[in-house]
Image (cartoon, rainbow, N blue to C red):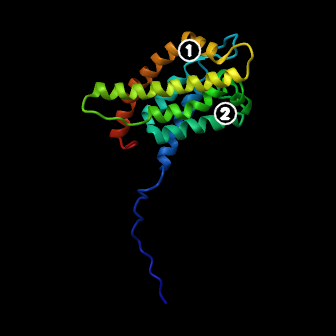
Amino acid sequence: MNATVSSKPRPPEKNRFVSTQHMVLAGMFAALLAVISQISIPLPTGVPVTIQVFGIALVGTVLGWKLGLMSVLTYILLGAAGLPIFANFQGGIQCLAGLSGGYILAWPVMAVLAGIRVKHKNRTLTLACRAALSILGLMIVEIAGGFQWSLLTTEMSFGAIMAYSFVAFIPKDMIITVLAVVIGDQIRGPLEKAGYLK
């Protein structure tokens, strides 16, 4: 019996969750998060002032919710495994269990919300909707972070921590989150035209 082998190339797998190209993009943006995380100001409270939410919103806006989620989870898992990529070159599972761990654990939610592709004919309205979703994600991060922080300290109640956050963190974080959405939208456009993203 003679076996025949077809020389035709196999069609691309259209239903694949992500391509190798997408995995590379997710890894690159996880590395970007590691760099952005080192821009921080230590505070006596034990929770530093950072611009990490800028990175999370940027990743979600550029990559979309699926790849954005993958990129953020990659970053968190690498940090939890011990790589010094969290703020102030820290790493290890203790970072997730510490005072700022609640913020980190809520980042995937923010990345997903920032990555939802809301589209309207009016570009300004489109950006406003995406910014609103990102701000919603930011609020979830702040609440989750404040809750874990309150569980691990007897010095401040959850209400006191949230009041402190509205002075020390949230105004700055809202501004940089909106900025990340605007910049991320500009970055995503050329990547879509080049065929790297859909």
- Residue 40 visible somewhere in the drawing: no
Q: Is residue 131 left or right of residue 76?
A: left
Name the residue located 43 percent from the left edge and 58 percent from the top edge: 13
Relative to 171, residue 182 above or below: below
- Disc 2 packing (10 Å; few <14; some 14–19; many ≥20): many
Give the structural element (helix, strand or loop) at label 2.
helix
Spot occupied by residue 44 in the image (x, y as percentages of width and height): 70, 10
Identify the residue at image location x=48%, y=36%: 112
Mark 1 nearby-residue class (10 Å; few <14, some 14–19, many ≥20): some
Identify whether 16 is placed above or below 44: below
Q: Is residue 59 left or right of residue 104?
A: left
Instruction: Residue type at mark 2: give it.
Output: Gly
Which residue has dot 2 on it? 79
Quarter of the figure with residue 27 = top right
Q: Secondary structure at mark 1?
A: loop
Location of residue 150 in the rendering, given as x and y in whole percent from the top left corner? 68, 20
Q: Separation of disc 1 and disc 2 at Cα?
A: 23 Å
Which of the labelled discs sits on residue 63, or is there none? none
User: Callout 1, which amino acid?
Assistant: Phe
Query: Mark 1 = which residue?
Result: 169
The tag earlier along the polypeptide, 1 or 2, is: 2
Q: Nearer the viewer, residue 160 or 127?
A: 160
